[in-house]
């Protein structure tokens, strides 16, 4: 039961984080940096992304209670946002590009490239569905996965190329769109009279 909840928490977050899709953006931002600075950039980005996601998970529930927002509202709104974000990524050949140079670890690599609206919304919905600790565990595993992939990004891009990374990213966004539709459907089922 615990492993199942962890796995069910991990999958949607894995799709939203899109670790392979981060690689071309990472490379565009850091290709002019020396190797030692690239490592530092990756560490900074991963730490900032993880802290932002954790803070969001901790404070969002209290804020929603204060505002009277219910789980069905979150499911419908979150599903619509995820669908819009995934549709935008599916229809546009490139994600939003950021000017390279300077410090890019915290912004834009950590936030919003690694942890952006799709990841935050997905984390919130996963927490509502499976609980806080499975969500934090799944989020930790996904951020660790990003860290590992970015450590070997140079070799990875040589193997699959930028086009290969973009193809994987598009497939992940299609899965995320389907997950978003499921959330909206379930949220509507909760609020509509039978």
Image (cartoon, rainbow, N blue to C red):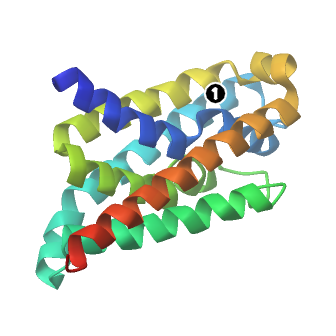
Image vertical order of residue 174 relative to residue 37, above or below: below
* Residue shown at the point (60%, 51%) measured from the top left: 113
Q: Give 149 or 119, whichever is nearer the viewer.
A: 119
Q: Secondary structure at mark 1?
A: helix
Q: Residue furthest front?
A: 194
Q: Give 76 or 138, whichever is nearer the viewer.
A: 76
Q: Which residue is mark 1?
A: 150
Relative horizontal placement of residue 57, taking residue 158 as reference (left or right): left
* Residue shown at the point (68%, 40%) measured from the top left: 171
Image vertical order of residue 129 relative to residue 164, above or below: below
- The percent position of residue 129, horizontal first and vertical second, equals 23, 50
Relative horizontal placement of residue 7, taking residue 176 as reference (left or right): left
Q: Give 94 or 53, whichever is nearer the viewer.
A: 94
Total labels: the figure holds: 1
Can residue 136 be spotted in the picture? yes
Q: Give 20 or 172, whichever is nearer the viewer.
A: 172
Q: Residue furthest bottom?
A: 67
Mark 1 crowdedness (10 Å alpha carbons): few <14, some 14-19, many ≥20:
many
* Residue shown at the point (63%, 21%) measured from the top left: 151
* Residue shown at the point (66%, 62%) measured from the top left: 87
Q: Quadrant of residue 140?
A: top left
- The percent position of residue 75, horizontal first and vertical second, equals 33, 65
Relative horizontal placement of residue 123, taking residue 45 as reference (left or right): left
Can residue 74 be spotted in the picture? no
- The percent position of residue 55, horizontal first and vertical second, equals 28, 55
Image vertical order of residue 101 relative to residue 69, above or below: above
- The percent position of residue 126, horizontal first and vertical second, equals 30, 48
């Amino acid at each position: 039961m615990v492993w199942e909840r962890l796995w069910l928490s991990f999958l949607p977050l894995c799709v939203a984080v899109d670790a392979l899709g981060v690689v071309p953006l990472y490379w565009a931002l850091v290709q002019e940096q020396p190797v030692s600075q690239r490592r530092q950039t990756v560490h900074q980005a991963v730490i900032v992304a993880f802290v932002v996601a954790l803070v969001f998970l901790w404070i969002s529930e209290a804020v929603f209670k204060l505002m009277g927002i219910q789980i069905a509202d979150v499911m419908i709104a979150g599903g619509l946002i995820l669908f819009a974000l995934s549709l935008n990524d599916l229809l546009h050949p490139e994600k939003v590009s950021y000017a390279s140079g300077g410090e890019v670890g915290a912004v834009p690599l950590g936030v919003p490239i690694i942890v952006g609206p799709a990841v935050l919304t997905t984390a919130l919905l996963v927490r509502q569905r499976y609980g806080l600790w499975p969500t934090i565990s799944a989020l930790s595993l996904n951020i660790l996965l990003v860290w590992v992939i970015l450590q070997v990004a140079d070799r990875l891009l040589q193997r699959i190329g930028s086009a290969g990374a973009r193809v994987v990213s598009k497939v992940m966004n299609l899965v995320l769109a389907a997950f978003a539709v499921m959330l909206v459907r379930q949220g509507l089922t909760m609020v509509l009279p039978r």
